[in-house]
């Protein structure tokens, strides 16, 4: 995990804006009901979070966690 965080820090800080690229997290491998993957995506500043299958409880939990984060930022 530390190596991954270091990688994203380098990409965000060391590369010029033209050399930076978007990051996408695909949550299809993380079928747990907590919002840890959402917290990680928002905390690392990812541009995209791919959540498929909204009718499954664990996916709804992730969407609700994202909604909480967005509401906290607005207030």
Image (spheres, grey):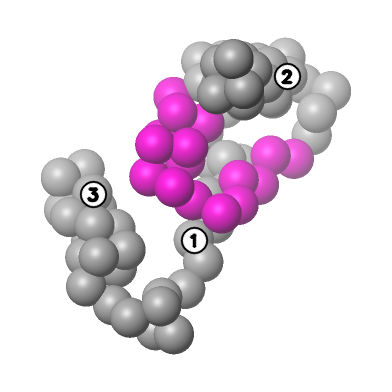
For the residues marked 1 and 2, what is the alpha-carbon distance in whole angstroms?
22 Å
- Element at badge 3? helix
Q: Which residue is mark 2?
A: 60
**Residue 67 or residue 74, whichever sits in front:** 74
Residue at figure coordinates x 79%, y 34% from the top left = 53
Magenta range: 36-52
Q: Which residue is mark 1?
A: 23
For the residues marked 2 and 3, what is the alpha-carbon distance in whole angstroms?
26 Å
- Element at badge 1? loop
The verdict on residue 41 being magenta is yes
The verdict on residue 47 being magenta is yes
Q: Is residue 63 above or below residue 11?
A: above
Q: Is residue 45 above or below residue 40?
A: below
Crowd class of label 2 (few under 14; some 14 to 19; many from 20; radius 10 Å): some
Given contact means CB atoms under 8 Å apart, are the residues at marks 1 and 2 in contact?
Answer: no
For the residues marked 3 and 1, what is the alpha-carbon distance in whole angstroms?
13 Å
Crowd class of label 1 (few under 14; some 14 to 19; many from 20; radius 10 Å): some
Residue at figure coordinates x 17%, y 55% from the top left = 6
């Amino acid at each position: 995990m530390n190596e991954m965080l270091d990688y994203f820090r380098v990409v965000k800080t060391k590369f010029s804006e033209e050399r930076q690229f978007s990051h996408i997290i695909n949550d299809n491998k993380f079928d747990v009901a907590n919002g840890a993957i959402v917290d990680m995506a928002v905390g690392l500043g990812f541009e995209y979070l791919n959540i498929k299958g909204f009718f499954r409880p664990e996916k709804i939990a992730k969407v609700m966690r994202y909604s909480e984060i967005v509401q906290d930022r607005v207030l």
